[in-house]
Image: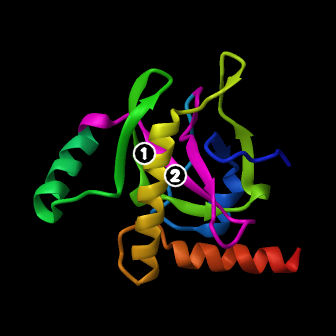
C-alpha cells in the first residue's frame, strides 16, 4: 500500500467500484489516460477513512449548474472551481465518497512531481466538504453516492481485517 497524503490526488482500483456497486460513483475510465483523479482528505473522526472527491474538466457544464443552484439556494457548497495543473477544474463535492487505503491504486503525478493545489483552494474545498458532510449526516441528500452505506461497508471491512 502507498502512503496517503491529504491534499494530494489519487486514482482508485476497479475493485472499489465492483464492491460498492453504486451507480452514482464516478467510475474508472481508461482511454490512454487514467481518470478520474480524486482529491483526498481524511475523515475527522474515522482516521482510516479517506474522502475522495472527483475532479472534472467540464467546467462550463458545472458553471451552469452552479448558477442554477445559486439562484435557487443563494449559496452553493457542492461545487468548487479552481486551478489544477494550470487549468480550471471543478471539484465535485456533490460526488465525494469515503474509501480506505487498500482501494487506492496510485498517486497522480505530472512531470515526476505529485500534483497539488494551493493552500487557499485546499482550505476552501475542505471547509465546504466538511459542511456538506454535516448536512448529509442529517439525512439530507446533498451528495449523490450513498455515502452512509459505503462508509458502513468500509468500517465493517476494517473490523474483519
Residue at screen point 31% across, 36% down: 59
Residue designated by label 1:
91
Tag 1 secondary structure: strand
Left/right of residue 56 with respect to residue 108 in the rendered view: left
The location of residue 1, given as percent across then percent down, is 86, 49
**Residue numbers of the magenta segment:** 32-60
- In the rendered image, which quarter is residue 94 located in? bottom left
In the rendered view, would you say 130 is above or below 38?
A: below
Tag 2 secondary structure: strand
Q: Which colour scheme is used?
A: rainbow
Left/right of residue 157 with respect to residue 88 in the rendered view: right
Residue at screen point 45% across, 40% down: 121
Q: Are marks 2 and 1 in contact (CB under 8 Å)?
A: yes
Marked residue nearer the N-terminal end (2 or 1):
2
- In the rendered image, which quarter is residue 97 located in? bottom right
Label 1 packing within 10 angstroms: few (<14), some (14-19), many (20+): many
The location of residue 101, given as percent across then percent down, is 77, 56
Residue designated by label 2:
53
In the image, 105 versus 21, the foreground residue is 105
Total numbered badges shown on the rendered structure: 2
Single out the residue that lies furthest toward the bottom.
138
| Magenta run includes residue 151 | no
Residue at screen point 18% across, 44% down: 64
In the rendered view, would you say 40 is above or below 119?
A: below
Amino acid at each position: 500500500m502507498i502512503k496517503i497524503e491529504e491534499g494530494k490526488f489519487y486514482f482508485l482500483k476497479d475493485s472499489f467500484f465492483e464492491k460498492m456497486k453504486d451507480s452514482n460513483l464516478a467510475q474508472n475510465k481508461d482511454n490512454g489516460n487514467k481518470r478520474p483523479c480524486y482529491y483526498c482528505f481524511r475523515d475527522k473522526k474515522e482516521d482510516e477513512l479517506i474522502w475522495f472527491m472527483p475532479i472534472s474538466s467540464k467546467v462550463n457544464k458545472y458553471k451552469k449548474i452552479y448558477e442554477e443552484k445559486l439562484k435557487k439556494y443563494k449559496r452553493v457548497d457542492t461545487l468548487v472551481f479552481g486551478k489544477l495543473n494550470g487549468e480550471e477544474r471543478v471539484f465535485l463535492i456533490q460526488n465525494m465518497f469515503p474509501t480506505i487505503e487498500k482501494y487506492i491504486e496510485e498517486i497522480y503525478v505530472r512531470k515526476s512531481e505529485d500534483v497539488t493545489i494551493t493552500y487557499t483552494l485546499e482550505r476552501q474545498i475542505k471547509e465546504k466538504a466538511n459542511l456538506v458532510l454535516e448536512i448529509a449526516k442529517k439525512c439530507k441528500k446533498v451528495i449523490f453516492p450513498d455515502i452512509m452505506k459505503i462508509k458502513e461497508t468500509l468500517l465493517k471491512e476494517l473490523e474483519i481485517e
